[in-house]
Amino acid sequence: MNNEAKLAAIFPMLAETNVPIQELDIEVVARNSLLRSGIHTVAQLLQLSHTELVGLFPNRNLPFYSEIIYQLTCLAQPPKTAKIDDTYTVERLPDDFWRDAK
């Protein structure tokens, strides 16, 4: 992995996202480090390289880095929709449904 590549290259689908950093489910210390560094949105976060992101945390705390990458990955995934196959409709009731109702 190229450590100087911007995070936007890994998460291009989030490049225009104006989600505030406060909405990411990350440790308060990590969030505060980002905010103190002037990073207030996901779009701003994506302008950092891996090296720059790690450098924002006290003592180069890698769990914070991993947590942020995980949250970005979750944010980049499309939301799961309910499967129609998982629900019963009148047309799709099991054959023994009415027999058990007595």
Image (cartoon, rainbow, N blue to C red):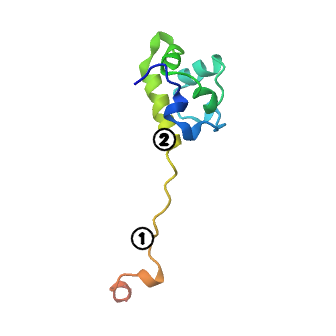
Q: Earlier in the sequence, mark 1 or mark 2?
A: 2
Residue 75 vertical position relative to residue 1 in the rendered view, above or below: below
Name the side, left or right, on which 10 lies relative to 99. Answer: right
Determine whether the residue tagged by mark 1 lies in a helix, strand or loop.
Answer: helix
Q: Position of residue 60 (x, y in %)?
A: 46, 13
Q: Position of residue 3 (x, y in %)?
A: 45, 20
Density class for disc 2 (Cα within 10 Å; few <14, some 14-19, many ≥20) is few
Q: Quadrant of the N terminus?
A: top left
* Residue nearer the viewer, 55 or 92: 55
Q: Quadrant of the C terminus?
A: bottom left
Name the side, left or right, on which 62 lies relative to 43. Answer: left
Residue that label 1 marks: 85
Density class for disc 1 (Cα within 10 Å; few <14, some 14-19, many ≥20) is few
Residue 101 vertical position relative to residue 70 in the rendered view, above or below: below
Residue that label 2 marks: 74
Name the side, left or right, on which 47 lies relative to 102. Answer: right
In this rendering, the count of numbered labels is: 2
* Residue nearer the viewer, 10 or 34: 10
Residue drawn at x 49%, y 19% as measured from the top left: 4
Q: Amino acid at mark 1?
A: Asp
Residue drawn at x 45%, y 16% as measured from the top left: 61
Residue 84 vertical position relative to residue 63 in the rendered view, above or below: below
User: Residue 24's image quarter?
Assistant: top right
The answer to whether residue 26 is visible is: no
* Residue nearer the viewer, 1 or 20: 1
Q: Amino acid at mark 2?
A: Cys
Q: Position of residue 77 (x, y in %)?
A: 49, 46
Q: Position of residue 75 (x, y in %)?
A: 53, 41
Determine whether the residue tagged by mark 2 lies in a helix, strand or loop.
Answer: helix
